[in-house]
Amino acid sequence: MASPARHFAPIDFKSRFPALDGIRALAIVMVFALHYGGGTHGGPLLNLVNQVRLRGWIGVDLFFTLSGFLITGILYDTRADSHYFKRFFARRSVRIFPIFYLVFTIFLVLTPFLHYQWRGGHLLFLIYMGNFSLAADPSLEIIRSAKFPAASAHLVHFWSLCVEEQFYLVWPLVVWFARDRVRIIRIAAALSILALVLRVIMVEIVRPSNLEVSMIHQLPFRMDSLLLGAILALLLRGPNADRWQRRCKFAFLIALAAFIALSFALPSPTAPWLMTAGFSLLALASAGLIGVTLRPGSPAFRLFNLRPLRILGKYSYGFYVYHVLWAGAWAAFVSFLTRKLHSSLLANALSDVLNFATAFLVAKLSYDLFEVRFLRFKKYFEYDSEVREHRTNFAEELKV
């Protein structure tokens, strides 16, 4: 295995970092724990576990930063491509759209049987603007079933998919027009500062109870989570890639320590520091963690390169999409188990294990049997550099 001290060379979008799948696994476990890890109350240890679980939403921030890192790398490396926009959006579409629209197709098919009560605001999810619907009416996070309430469909987690898709629509234009690496870094840094300023303003003028849907779920206030990943991608493509990669460890440790210290000092989930600087600290910590993981042989690399984490990370997108759709049914199952086992703790533990296994199985089957059929279309949208590489390899094979 390569030594962690080895020089870290500048990367490009064709570089493969399997350990990043391990980071995806961490993010999805955190999100799952937030949604289903309840019931851990009753003593100092369980209360501590619950406090950690309640911060599982950090997994979404980690997803955002990783997405910004990967997408910006692709956009920057292919900015001179002959079909820059067409190929980028086509490749994103075959990866993201299939299961997203599959879910809504399933809901439509089940509507006559479960009597789903569709409302106009739900339709905005179909064009990745559902986060605006939720800002206007938070009750739109559920498509209620008039016949079986426990089978109501939950859409609340789709807000993050909307934010990412909106970022994908805007950021390619910025990279294409700016072109220069340093200029793009400056733009990303300025926009990150703007996001923080906008959050400070919102905290001052909006009631805490309304901040989640009106601020946390909206791209202008969350773009720094994506843009810190973008900045990392560009720094690691420059001549000082090795130096910047080494600094990632300190960025991660300092930002994480500051976030933890503030969390203990001011634990309120709507504390002003969390809604403002807190998100910036998480974006910096996420970027630092990603950067540290990229160096082969480092402790972070060895951890996130573990095969179970890489496997879970491979199916993390489907896992995220599917895992909370029928949360009400799992809540009803927990109630049933509690009555049978006479223990809320055991009921929640058993339900969580079954739920996690089910979500993973569904995500794996979805990927293996459905998503890969669409992913094969990527070969029709290869970038110029990939086409040249294939031609060169073919020519070399002919010589042999």
Image (cartoon, rainbow, N blue to C red):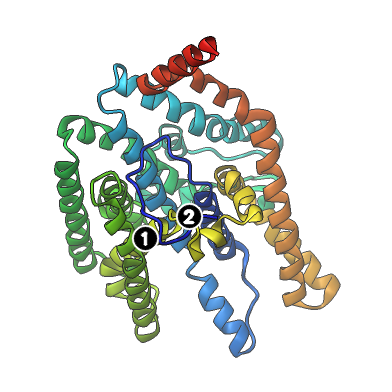
Q: Position of residue 112 (x, y in %)?
A: 68, 32
Q: Secondary structure at mark 2?
A: loop
Q: CA distance from mark 2 to mark 1?
A: 38 Å
Residue 291 visible in image: yes
Q: Position of residue 240 (x, y in %)?
A: 24, 52
Looking at the picture, does residue 354 appear above or below residue 367? Answer: below
- Earlier sequence position, callout 2 versus callout 1: 1
Type of amino acid under label 2: Pro
Disc count in the image?
Answer: 2
State which mark lies toward you, 2 or 1: 2
Residue 207 visible in image: no
Quadrant of the rendering where the N terminus is positioned: bottom right
Which residue is drawn at the image coordinates 68% and 53% (left, top)? Answer: 150
Q: As drawn, is 279 to the left or to the right of 340? A: left
Residue beneath label 2, please? 296
Q: Secondary structure at mark 1?
A: helix
